[in-house]
Image: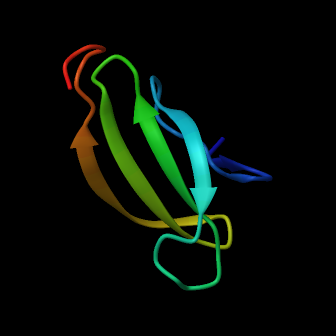
Amino acid sequence: MIGSAFGPTPPGGWVLVAAADFDSNGKPDYLRYNPGTRQTVIWYLNNNVFVSAAFGPTIPPAGGW
């Protein structure tokens, strides 16, 4: 399966944190988080089709702020 009714299927280890219009195109995008690596990424979507991605910050371990 390449996707689902709600959008593309993420690679293993990634969870959906939020859906918002990050690129102001009027369509929701996904903010994803990998708890194993603490990496964040925004998946830019056109309707429910993956277009591109931009990695964000790696979240420090708890107490590391």
| Image quadrant where one finds the C terminus | top left
The image quarter containing residue 34 is: top left
Q: Position of residue 24 (x, y in %)?
A: 52, 83
Q: Is residue 3 above or below residue 65?
A: below
The image quarter containing residue 59 is: top left
Q: Determine the residue positioned at 43% across, 35% down.
A: 33
Q: In the picture provided, is 23 more to the left or to the right than 30?
A: left
The residue closer to the viewer here, 61 or 36, is: 61
Q: Position of residue 55 (x, y in %)?
A: 27, 51
Q: Determine the residue positioned at 80% across, 52% down.
A: 5
Q: Position of residue 8 (x, y in %)?
A: 61, 51
Q: Is residue 20 above or below residue 2?
A: below
| Image quadrant where one finds the N terminus | top right
Q: Determine the residue positioned at 45% across, 23% down.
A: 13
Q: Is residue 63 above or below residue 20?
A: above
Q: Determine the residue positioned at 19% across, 19% down.
A: 64
